[in-house]
Amino acid sequence: MSEPLTSSRGRQIVAVGRELLEREGAEALTMRRLADALGIRAPSLYKHLPDKASLEAAIIADGFEQAATAFEVASDDGVRDPVAAFVTAYRAFAAAHPHLYRLMTGGPLPRERLPRGLEARTAAPLLQATGSPARARAAWAFIHGMIILELDERFPSDGLTEMAWESGISAFRTPPPTSPPTSPA
Amino acid sequence: MSEPLTSSRGRQIVAVGRELLEREGAEALTMRRLADALGIRAPSLYKHLPDKASLEAAIIADGFEQAATAFEVASDDGVRDPVAAFVTAYRAFAAAHPHLYRLMTGGPLPRERLPRGLEARTAAPLLQATGSPARARAAWAFIHGMIILELDERFPSDGLTEMAWESGISAFRTPPPTSPPTSPA
DNA sequence: GTCTATAGTGGGATAGAC
DNA sequence: GTCTATCCCACTATAGAC
């Protein structure tokens, strides 16, 4: 009665766990705190889920579903620069759910516990916007790096970080030359 | 007898702590494990350092000194594309010391415990290579993002990640146009 | 499906003797 | 500068009664 966390009580536990995580961060997401928030004792949780890893995986899957949908909506407007549109949606998701974002991106993904195809679905809009897997990977690295360095306050708090975003977006907007600037053949 | 960890025993403790970290990762860096590695009991450590945070800060400072020197050497060869040269040195450092790299870049910097100017010194070579603080920030985000996503195995293990590196390096090599491509004025 | 009780592990840190 | 003894904390998880 637990593996995929599909019972209604199971879904409630995951929802409350996500709220706890989003409100107070990953270190607050303990079985004791979660039980408190539900008004039960920690051991009772194990009637609904096998272990903590399954809880985290369920929360992560939840986050990916939501992010994927947001990215798909953003790429649908079609009017704007597709990379800029993706970046806006990505930054909005991370800003709205910083602790969830960290859980989703910090450390290896528990892929075997996630729904098939979910990771690929989430990645698809950026793949589409950049036009190639290699460029998508580079663009994701830039975007994720900016997000995480900002969250960790690794940049000075001046106006330059917005310029850095612009700089990266324009760098990934159009395919770069394959060799250093020379006169066109 | 502890704050800056300047005594010879203090320096030895930091060195052994760094070895432990590099060999087994951040979760192995406990006061008990460190004491074991030194052949003493954990409480004895507190005669040499005030708390665990000071140990981590000293290890981080150690890593920054080493990284800064490596980056300075790499920018000195002058012959090559400066961004590519920096990336090579940065990747080499992270690959040689992945657990140290994570400690240095994961989470906020304990700046008040680090030598003045060390962070700026480490950042200087990339600033030089990119030509502007905003571009340096964007390039660092790309490079750090690539490193951390690779370490966490977030990319598929195909040949495309090397292409992503190339893609990012060429994207940050030359200043991009400030507006979409138009004919030069 | 909830409870009490508890096992088992690990962590950082202090007091005070030597 | 090292020791022993210990405190206090927190965590995941299980057993078995109700």
Image (tube, coloured by chain):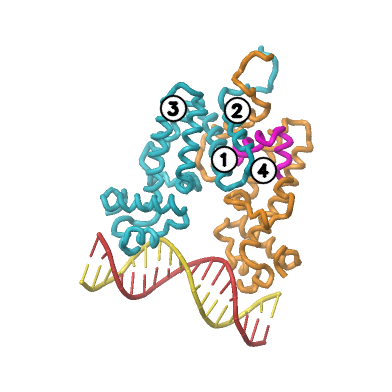
Chain colours: A cyan, B orange, C red, D yellow
Do the residues at pointers 2 and 4 share their chain?
no
Question: Observer-nearest residue: B148 or B22?
Answer: B148
Residue matched to label 2: A171
Residue B92's label in the rendered image is 4
Residue matched to label 1: A145
| Magenta residue span | B122-145
**Residue B89: where, in percent of width, then height?**
69, 41
Residue A75's label in the rendered image is 3
Mark 2 belongs to which subunit? A
Alpha carbons under labels 2 and 4: distance apart: 24 Å
Q: What's the amino acid at mark 3?
A: Ser
Residue at (42, 24) in percent of width and height: A77
User: Dot 1: what SS?
Assistant: helix
Q: Quadrant of residue B165?
A: top right
* Residue B73 relative to residue A91: left or right: right
Foreground mark, 4 or 1? 1
User: Dot 3: what SS?
Assistant: helix
Foreground mark, 3 or 4? 3
Alpha carbons under labels 2 and 1: distance apart: 15 Å
Alpha carbons under labels 4 and 1: distance apart: 18 Å
Q: Is residue B11 magenta?
A: no
